[in-house]
Image (tube, rainbow, N blue to C red):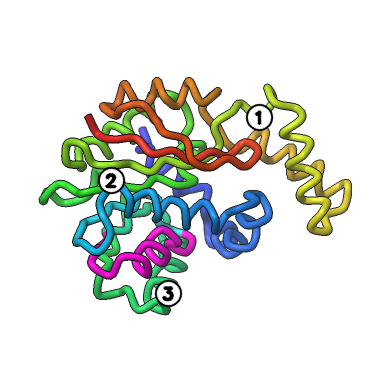
Amino acid sequence: MASQASVSAQKFDPARANEYLAQSRIALAGYDACHELSACMLATVLGSGGTARILVAGAGGGAREVVIAGALEPGWRFTAADPSEPMMEISVEAVGRAGLADRTHIHLGGIDDLPPGPLFDAATLIGVLHHIPGEAAKLDLLHSLASRLKPGAPLILAGNRNAYASQPVLLGAWGERWRMQGATPEEVQAKLGKILQGADPPASEAAVAELLAAAGFGAPLWFFSSLFWGACLARRT
């Protein structure tokens, strides 16, 4: 059976990787704000001006977590992990342009493939969980992250957190967002069909909290919302 990492990586072939940066900012209103606030949340919990080792899971596609947090905190070092080679190639270029290559370890693979080592001070999982099919696989991924974190370490978790079909108004507004960016009615319908078939988000914020608790994290503190998308911070218990 294919691993959770390999299953999600197959979705991000070179063609999908090349369109990711432009598409993500349309699909998620506030894309950069979410990453900026995520860095601010981590700096608040870890303390600004110090040193920390941050695990960035699903870092492919530009490694915005590394680029933004690395600029905010010069003492932080990063391990950027992603199983998709095309997506990771984009991130390697972005990290290099930002002058952060010497502070970033690139890991092409899943969290379970990381070599044993000291536990991390924090982790991020942004835009990943809703691409993992099934509750069991989502829980496995969160368990893997928890096992790599120090007790009390913060996790930033961000992604879609409502069943798409259960929220028709949000789904309609998501389509209007695409229309606002110039998509034709036919293109909007195609994109709505794709999102309904192509991802498996948790059913609700309560479902996210249950997954986190089962994986060994405390209650989530939600700090960002944009239609289906939400971002929260939860600590390793």
Upstream in sequence: badge 3 or badge 2? 3
Residue under pointer 2: 111
Give the left or right position of residue 162, taking residue 143 as reference: right
Secondary element at tag 1: helix
Query: Residue at label 1?
Result: 164
For label 1, the crowd category at 10 Å Cα-Cα, with few meaning under 14, some 14 to 19 and many 20 or more, is: many
Image coordinates for residue 169, horizontal then vertical, percent = 76, 30
Which segment is the magenta one?
Answer: 61-78
Label 1 or label 2, whichever comes before in sequence order = 2
Q: Residue at x 34, y 35 (%)?
A: 234
Q: Amino acid at mark 1?
A: Tyr
Question: Dot 3: what SS?
Answer: helix
User: Distance from label 1 to label 3 (Cα)?
Assistant: 33 Å
Q: Where 46 falls versus 229 (above or below)? A: below
At 45% from the left and 26% from the top, the residue drawn is 208
Circle 3 residue: 93
As shown in the figure, which amino acid type bears the numbered disc 2?
Ile
The answer to whether 232 appears left or right of 24 in the picture is left
Residue 232, image x and y in percent?
Answer: 44, 38
Helix, strand or loop status at disc 2: helix
Residue 103 appears at what percent x and percent y? 25, 70
Q: CA distance from mark 1 to mark 2?
A: 28 Å
- Residues under numbered marks 1 and 2 in contact, where contact means CB atoms less than 8 Å apart: no
Three-letter amino acid code of the residue under disc 3:
Glu
**Residue located farthest toward the right when viewing the structure as drawn:** 185
Q: Measured from the top left, where is residue 48 in percent x and y?
A: 28, 59
Seen from the viewer's position, the closer of residues 1 and 157 is: 157
Q: Name the residue located 48 percent from the left edge and 60 percent from the top edge.
A: 61
